[in-house]
Image (spheres, rainbow, N blue to C red):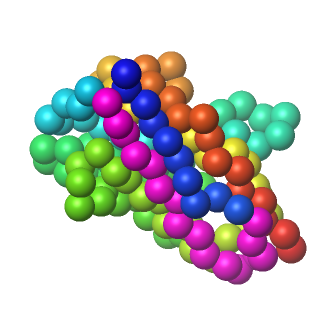
Amino acid sequence: QVQLVEFGGGSVQAGDSLRLSCKLSGRTFSDYAMAWFRQAPGKEREFVAAITSNPSTTDYADSGKGRFTISRGNAKNIIHLQINNMIPEDTAVYYCAAFWDGSQWVAPAFRIWGQGTQVIVSS
């Protein structure tokens, strides 16, 4: 059974940094894209960042450029999201997604999702 598990969320102060991680377990593929999305209370789930493999490329939502960094761990089935200089607007549940259909960086294009990890940023 394929599963995604996120970890690393928590409560931080504005200006702090946080690193989220996501591990894909179960059946794996040699080449696939993984991504981070987030959903704030009362808002739709939005794209944050994505990383592909073979070749390895990254892409970011405009709101995260400069503060968010997505990377792949030593094992191809682990990705990280480094968030620097956090602001209260970063408060959301952060979700990891995998098995992209190759279209756009939108939620319906991903088949597998993690359970999410809560991030709260206080001012």
**Taking 40 as reference, is 27 above or below it?**
above
* Residue at image coords 75%, 71%: 12
The secondary structure that most of the magenta stretch takes on is strand
* 45 part of magenta stretch: no
Quadrant of image for the C terminus: bottom right
Q: Is residue 99 left or right of residue 31?
A: right
Quadrant of image for the N terminus: top left
**Taking 87 as reference, is 58 above or below it?**
above
* Residue at image coords 23%, 49%: 76
The percent coordinates of residue 75 (x first, y second) are 24, 54
Q: Magenta stretch: give its range.
A: 11-26
* 12 part of magenta stretch: yes
Q: Nearer the viewer, residue 64 or 95?
A: 95
The percent coordinates of residue 5 (x first, y second) are 49, 42
The percent coordinates of residue 102 (x first, y second) are 30, 25
Evaluate whether residue 47 shows in this view.
no
* Residue at image coords 35%, 36%: 25
